[in-house]
Amino acid sequence: DKNACSFAIDKKETQALLMEQFDRLLAVEENNFSSIKKTQIILEIYYILLTQCRTKELHSASQMTADTTYAKQVMAYINRHYMENLSLDILAKEVGLSAQYLSKHFKSTTDMGILQYINRIRLEHANNELLSGDATVTEAALNNGFSSVKAYIETCKKVYGMTPTHWMKEIRK
């Protein structure tokens, strides 16, 4: 199959990071909300794989490497700038592609839309800030790139099925 890919882990540190995440995943205690924690860990594994592993397409390695490079560049940019107002146009300009092509490419490479990825990164950071006890829901939302508290709450409900406050209470149980 021309589209078949194989992943090769570049560094021992990456292997160690992945093993650490898998150990965390296996150590999650089962309860009504353990799926939330598992989802967070799986997203971290997904990010590690996309950013730290090289991809080879069996019949077109150079094309696949170029393709995943764009997604990696966009993900890295989002991870550095998630607190800012990001748009598809800004991201496309960053990697030198048209907005339409980048949107389609990112979705086909990662199985996730760009806005969905941005919101997941923002959500992870905002939730970590909430858990640390250093911020209110409003502060966590605005400190981590959400345009409003409403946007943060809606994203949290979409991903976890509950508000940030409820999510935090469940995680702390």
Image (cartoon, grey):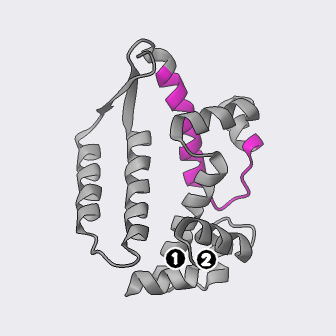
Q: Is residue 81 visible?
A: no
Q: What residue do we see at 37% from left, 64% from top?
A: 38
The N terminus - image quarter: top left
Q: What residue do we see at 74% from left, 72% from top?
A: 148
Q: Could you tell whether 107 is left or right of 142 in the image? A: left
Label annotation for residue 129: 1
Tag 1: Cα neighbours inside 10 Å, few (<14), some, or many (≥20)?
Answer: some
Tag 2: Cα neighbours inside 10 Å, few (<14), some, or many (≥20)?
Answer: many
Q: Could you tell whether 28 is left or right of 80 in the image? A: left
Q: Earlier in the sequence, mark 1 or mark 2?
A: 1
Three-letter code, disc 1: Glu
Label annotation for residue 75: none
Do the CB atoms of the residues marked 1 and 2 lie less than 8 Å apart?
yes
Instruction: Residue 98 in the image: state x and y as whole percent.
Output: 74, 30
Q: What residue do we see at 39% from left, 28% from top?
A: 55
User: Is residue 75 located in the magenta-colored stretch of the structure?
Assistant: yes
**134 in relation to 28, above or below:** below
Q: Could you tell whether 9 is left or right of 157 in the image? A: left
Q: Nearer the viewer, residue 13 or 55?
A: 55
**104 in relation to 153, above or below:** above
What is the span of residues highlighted in magenta in the rendered image? Answer: 64-89
Q: Is residue 38 visible?
A: yes
Instruction: Residue 15 in the image: state x and y as whole percent.
Output: 24, 44
Distance of label 1 from label 2 (alpha carbons): 6 Å
Q: What residue do we see at 74% from left, 57% from top?
A: 85
- Label 2 sits on residue: 140
